[in-house]
Amino acid sequence: MLADNIIFLKKNYPEIYNALKKNEESADQNSITQEDTRSSHKTLKVKQAEKFLYLHSKYDPIHEAEAIIDKLEEREDIDDKTHVVFYGLGLGYHIDAFVRRFPDTTFSLYEPSIEVFQHFLSLENINNLPMKKIHTIQCEYKPEAMDEFFNKLLSNTDEKTVIMDLPIYQSIFKEQYILFFDGFRAVVKSNRSSLNTNYAFKKRWVINSAINFKKVLNTPNIIIENNGVFKKKIAILVSAGPSLDYEIENLKLIKEKKLAHIFAVGSALNTLIHNNIYPDAMCTYDPLEENQAAFIKVNELNITTIPVIFGSSVGFETLQNYQGPKYHMITSQDTVSQFFLNLVNGEELVTVKDAPSIAVVTLELLHKLEFDQVILVGQNLAYKDGKHYAEGIDYQITIDKERDEHLIKAVDVSGDAILTSESFNSMRKQIEATIKNFDMVVINTTLGGAHIEGTQFMPMSDVISKKLKASILVGDEFKNILQSEIYDKVYLKVQLVKMTKAYESYQRLLTLLKQQLIKVDELVVNKNTKQSSLMYQKLDSLLVKLEANEFGKVFALPMNRVEHELLAINVQRIKINKNELKKIRELIAYVDPFINLLSCDSQLNQKIMEILTESIGSIFSEDQKKKF
């Protein structure tokens, strides 16, 4: 390994350096060897079975590298807004050719073979590459290397990403090649889904949390104040999959004999009510207004006896329309409660993690309530007989399996093939991760549903005969969960004063930022580089203060989280530009619309502060009334 590369790796990638050093001492160095070509450049010869394959041309690897980049250019529009991932470094000829042709384009390096990477480092000085254009370097020296690479890649760029693979790698490293490309597609799809979720929910999370805060202050925290009434008991988590229809009679029996606690999630509530089954509790957390659809039948029939456990960032309309008993759990997306609430006993505030499905959230909740076992019902996570939901749900969706090209294949509880969607598949993986994370005992009774790793499939009739042998419910468990003084009221008052001051400061910062943007823009137009640079530094300082402001952190930035993340990524990318005037012009092009976006929320911000001031004030008003 070249001395410069040793220094570079020790400083920037010490784990990779240690892995390379260890491999150098133990590996068979004869499976991949260097060989001179006719053009006097090196190539790498790889022994596979009884034959040899070459990573580069045996004749002229430089000419071959240019041809590879020609094909890339034909296939993709490469510019300074593109990010290229080099899969397979070889000896770097194609990378050098690329850098010569596209000096302004950023790139990352990924090598699946630790041996090839060692040869690369013995001949190619990494410092000769444009370091400011390299986002990350990775070698597959451990099983987690690929996932770590994808995480770094997606967190460091919002540019169009293009993969440039060295063609021969598809043959020589076939399994790793397939895993990489499949993994990349899955991560991009997941990232896109997460981005879409953030776009859809960003303002609702904050608005709901603010409006619901009064309900949070006036209802028991189900996780903290449950008094251990669910400990070592069995919970039945009922979802709205079509297989729920098969279990109606079994659920009636369980309810009648009080054999387990029945928790309804999502639209399953409508099916249960349609069949005259009142669950012991219903759980809700979706931030959208449409979340009310799950409560259609309950509200139509004016049912007010079923306890609802709500995530603190749930759609506020759901809580306003339901008049029955309520219990709250703080969700991870609720920045409001996490700022204002402090437990009297000094312990950390317990939250439940936001997830793509209420079933996932409820699984975590049931774990925190210390249930001994969880029985899944109607958790299809796939289509059954072309149906999405069980009967009794008015917004039923059906599909034509033959025509729907977006469906993917999965395995059901019996090991047979079944059709599912990307959304269902993502939910299944989340459920599996939750079960594994909390080491839960979960039984899946969903006939024809997708197989869920970590669960045991058992028909409900067997569950009743083997697991639910005796009555375990008293019937008044929720009635005995009462609100106590768990939240520190002094802290609440102090935080309100702090937030009020932060809000006033935030408004001033926003005004100053808009004024500063106008000044910088004028200087850039006049090509006054020195003054532009000084003024932009002041602008940047104001932006840092805004990001550190408590109102910004709790309300303004979470409501614009996607745009804020994109701004941070682009600012990081642009700041390496050496042309000062061009750099400032580009920075303004991103900062200006972001500040305007924040300004558009001014009336909403004022309304949020009014709501919170009233909510917190009402607590102290009630205390005053109690004294007289």
Image (cartoon, rainbow, N blue to C red):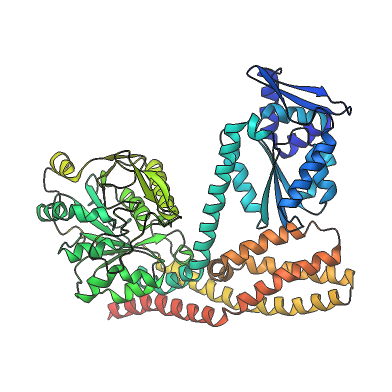
Residue 441 falls left or right of residue 463: right
Kindly tell me whether residue 218 is visible in this rendering. Answer: no
**In-front residue for pair 547/562:** 562
Residue 25: percent from the left, percent from the top? 69, 18
User: Against 232, is 581 above or below?
Assistant: below
So how many labels did they put on this image? 0
Q: At 50% across and 71% down in the image, what residue appears?
A: 203
Q: Quadrant of the N terminus?
A: top right
Residue 558 lies, in percent from the top left, at 54, 66
Comparing 116 with 480, the one in front is 116
Residue at figure coordinates x 72%, y 31% from the top left: 117
Q: Position of residue 206 (x, y in %)?
A: 48, 69
- Can residue 48 be seen at all in this image of the molecule? yes
Q: Please identify the quadrant where the C terminus is shown.
A: bottom left
Question: Where, by quadrant of the figure, is residue 542 drawn?
Answer: bottom right
The one of 507 and 266 positioned closer to us in this rendering: 266
**In the orientation shown, which residue stands out farthest toward the front?**
402
Q: Nearer the viewer, residue 251 or 385?
A: 385
- Determine the residue positioned at 26% across, 61% down: 268
Residue 613 place in picture, x, y as percent: 45, 78
Side (left or right) of 58 relative to 195: right
Give me the residue at 24% from left, 60% from top.
281
